[in-house]
């Protein structure tokens, strides 16, 4: 079974700083996707970024980028120029492909607070 | 796209009562998922539909839980004889085989409180 570990329960940075959230996962699969989702307080989960395991290039979406280290099974999220609206729970998630339900396996989350 | 919608957003019930939640996926999404999220935790998979077929159920889904997706459109999740341990946020997500295939888009959730 796959597991996802987020070792930082809480983080706090000042607005405009850069912050990196850590995620490691355990799998014997070779075909999979990794995701970061954001869940603002009392609001719904939204996709931040997605990485396909077969791609060597790290995914980037505006201020959000990942550092995907497949051999190390590490998938960190970097948020540049952080904004107050980035305050949320961030979940790392794993999805294996091509076998049955492509369900997401989530980590326990990192609560990120951006301070003015 | 109008996004995934869920109804109700909040439900308070007494132990032993039955409750039913509804999820409307993004139109034309053929895959639908239910997850459960307890306070301070990441969501956990409950069950999965491809079109109208329920293809996988988690061990978390006891026999008090049942889910349906008639005609491959909206889905319902029913919990019979609710227990206090059922208190959680129930999330629905949908995905398609088109652009951004396999990316799941989540609804706002139904927060269940069992007294």
Image (cartoon, coloured by chain):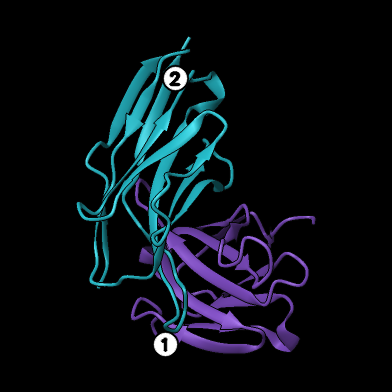
Residue B110 seen from this side: yes
Chain B shade in the render? purple
Count of numbered badges drawn on the protein: 2
Protein chain holding label 1: B
Residue B115 seen from this side: no
Residue identified by numbered label 2: A114
Residue B4, image x, y percentages: 69, 59
Outermost residue toward the top in this view: A116
Q: Are marks 2 and 1 on the same chain?
A: no
**A85 over A14 or under it: above or below:** below
Residue A101, image x, y percentages: 47, 79
Protein chain holding label 2: A
Going by the image, does A11 lie left or right of B95? Answer: left
Residue A6, image x, y percentages: 27, 45
* Residue at 58% from the left image edge and 47% from the top image edge: A44
Residue identified by numbered label 1: B63
Going by the image, does A55 lie left or right of B107? Answer: left
Residue A112, image x, y percentages: 39, 29
**Quadrant (top left/top right/bottom left/bottom right) for the N terminus of chain A:** bottom left
**Which label is found at residue B107?**
none
* Residue at 71% from the left image edge and 87% from the top image edge: B70
**B84 over B28 or under it: above or below:** above
* Residue at 40% from the left image edge and 31% from the top image edge: A78
Chain A shade in the render? cyan
Which picture quadrant has residue B64? bottom left
Of residues A62 and B61, which is closer to you in this image? A62
Q: Could you classify mark 1 by the number of other residues whose Cα lies within 10 Å: few (under 14), some (14-19), or many (20 or more)? A: few
Q: Secondary structure at mark 2?
A: strand
**B79 over A32 or under it: above or below:** below
Callout 2–callout 1 Cβ contact below 8 Å: no
């Amino acid at each position: 079974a796959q597991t996802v570990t987020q070792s930082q329960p809480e983080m706090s940075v000042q607005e405009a700083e850069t912050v990196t959230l850590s995620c490691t996962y355990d799998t014997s699969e070779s075909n999979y996707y990794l995701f970061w989702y954001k869940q603002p307080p009392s609001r719904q989960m939204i996709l931040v970024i997605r990485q396909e395991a077969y791609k060597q290039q790290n995914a980037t979406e505006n201020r959000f980028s990942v550092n995907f280290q497949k051999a190390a099974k590490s998938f960190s999220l970097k948020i540049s120029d952080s904004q107050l609206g980035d305050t949320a729970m961030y979940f790392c998630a794993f999805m294996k492909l091509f076998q049955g339900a492509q369900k997401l396996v989530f980590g326990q989350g990192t609560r990120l607070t951006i301070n003015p | 796209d109008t996004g995934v919608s869920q109804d109700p957003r909040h439900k308070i019930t007494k132990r032993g009562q039955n409750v039913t939640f509804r999820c409307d996926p993004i139109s034309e999404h053929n895959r639908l998922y239910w997850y459960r999220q307890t306070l301070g935790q990441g969501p956990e998979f409950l069950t999965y539909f491809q079109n109208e077929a329920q293809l996988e159920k988690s061990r978390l889904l006891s026999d008090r839980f049942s889910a349906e997706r008639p005609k491959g459109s909206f889905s319902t999740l029913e919990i019979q004889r609710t227990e206090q341990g059922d208190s959680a946020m129930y999330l629905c997500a949908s995905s398609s085989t088109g652009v951004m295939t396999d990316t799941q888009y989540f609804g706002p959730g139904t927060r269940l409180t069992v007294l």
